Image (cartoon, rainbow, N blue to C red):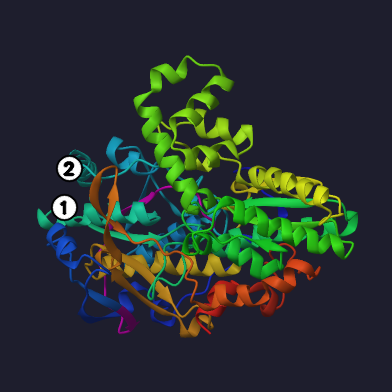
Amino acid sequence: MTMISPLQKARLQYKPKLPVALRNGISAVKTVEGAPTQSVADQDKINALFPATYGSPQIVFESGEAKAGKAINVGVILSGGQAPGGHNVIAGLFDGLKSINKDSKLYGFLKGPDGLVKNEYMELTADIIDAYRNTGGFDMIGSGRTKLEKIEQFETGRVNCEKLGISALVVIGGDDSNTNACLLAEYYKHNNIGINVVGCPKTIDGDLKNEFIEASFGFDTACRVYSELIGNIQRDANSAKKYWHFIKLMGRSASHIALECALQTHANICIVSEEVAAKKQTIAEIVDYIADVVAKRAAKGCNFGVALIPEGLIEFIPEMKTLIAELNDLLAHEEKVFSDLSKEDKIKFIADKLNPALSKTFMSLPQTIQLQLCLDRDPHGNVQVSLIETEKLLAEMVGSKLKAMKEQGSYKGKFSTQSHFFGYEGRCAAPSNYDADYCYSLGYNATALLNAGKTGYMSSVRNTINPADQWIAGGIPITMMMNMERRHGEDKPVIQKALVKLEDKPFKTFAANRDVWAVETDYVYPGPIQYFGPTEVCDLITKTLELEKA
């Protein structure tokens, strides 16, 4: 990087905070082990699949006496989608390793797990690390989505690590990536291969968390970026007073981002997928709810507003989930006949083949969405749900509903829409102070786990709602987070996704306020992330974390 912005230049000088237990270097860390652990569900099955790593104790680190440490070589992998703070995890790893012994080395495997298998790597030196401190993105070494599941991959990885003298790997990723890290750790430990594996919790979606992993890194920054944009749009809507903005937000499996942004901005409408599933709501009911809010605001002279839609909503609507499953099955068996039809004939063909209830749902959808459901297939022949423009679907269906209401005399307003999808805008933003601190601590802490000889663990830094002096560093066995799920027709061990809990404070706080936010123009404008200035402005935590830990 030859040209950097003034902000980036200033951010390179930021010194992230660390838990007290880690501040005197890894060699001065004392390891305290707790009781044996078990998985969140399916204990017998998970135990049988991970006999070498299952039941390991929870780890807490405390300050101890400094000891001379031996040099170790570690490999790091960025896995899956980008999230703000990944570079600081790597910086924390590097500094932690050098605190053990200045001759320790850190190697970055390029383009994700593929780099481990293909032996594509680079040594990460101080010059490289220093150029990326407190920056967003994963461009230091790149990322990828290759899954590490096969023995051949584990063996190839072993050979490549042994060539570099690597005795430990750190996998920075989400639930699937850390599941793969646990499989790798199990294989190496079970076969007495001297390579330990530790994971770090990454995903802007916020669905990798539990009692000991209180946040996945990147969630804080991404939500602040999206909330700034939503606030800007709300200000614009309140200025022009003529548009309803339908905004889809990332979050395929959980609605944490949409909920957090609603809490930060007080948008008029926020659909929470988990509530839709719990109430078994139909798409018509969701449309009716939005149309009712639009009509109530119109009656007050407010023909504008903002609606937040989680990316994965479609799969949480029971009738749509069933429709997608039926379409996947139907098109798998009728692929040749279907592919030869015109667009109009494709729609008629599907409507005729579905059962009457699903056919009615299918025909109620706008044609653009019908075609997306029919034509946009993944390599396995399944509907690509993430490509469905749910924000446009709802905007169009609400428009049709309001037209009917106007004909009945129950709506007299004007309804013009703008649609947006906020996704990639937040994944590589410069990390907030929270994520810069948290990520650096996760990386430094991962080095402490490796130095303690631990494998199959996830780096854990908690109590982060308080000043760093009160943060608790340690680790939990990845098996502790696992359950069995049906994937591609087989039962597989996976880290249990953390969905929005309707009984927890974040959702309850939203539910208690949404009726007022819906009708009133009670917008909050968070503004851009602040890196320099008063603590109460720069060191904010998410509303979600604040409410969960209150």
Q: x, y percentage for residue 330?
A: 39, 31
Q: Is the residue marked by circle 1 packed among few (<14), some (14-19), or many (20+) residues within 10 Å? A: some
Three-letter residue code for mark 1: Tyr
Q: Is residue 341 above or below residue 218?
A: above
Residue 535 in which image quadrant? bottom right
- What residue is at 30 percent from the left and 66 percent from the top? 481
Tag 1 near tag 2, CB within 8 Å: yes
**Predominant secondary structure in magenta?**
loop
Q: Is residue 5 above or below residue 461?
A: above
Three-letter residue code for mark 2: Ile
Pointer 1 or 2: first along the chain:
2
Q: Is the residue marked by circle 2 packed among few (<14), some (14-19), or many (20+) residues within 10 Å? A: few
Residue lying at the far left of the rendered structure = 191
Residue lying at the far top of the rendered structure = 340
Residue 3 in which image quadrant? top right
Q: Is residue 226 left or right of residue 135?
A: right
Q: Nearer the viewer, residue 125 or 55?
A: 55
- For label 1, the residue is 187
Q: Which stretch did the figure color magenta?
A: 60-84
> On the rendered image, what quadrant is the N terminus found in?
top right
Residue 149 in view (yes/no): yes
Q: Is residue 450 magenta?
A: no
- For label 2, the residue is 151
Determine whether the residue tagged by mark 2 lies in a helix, strand or loop.
helix
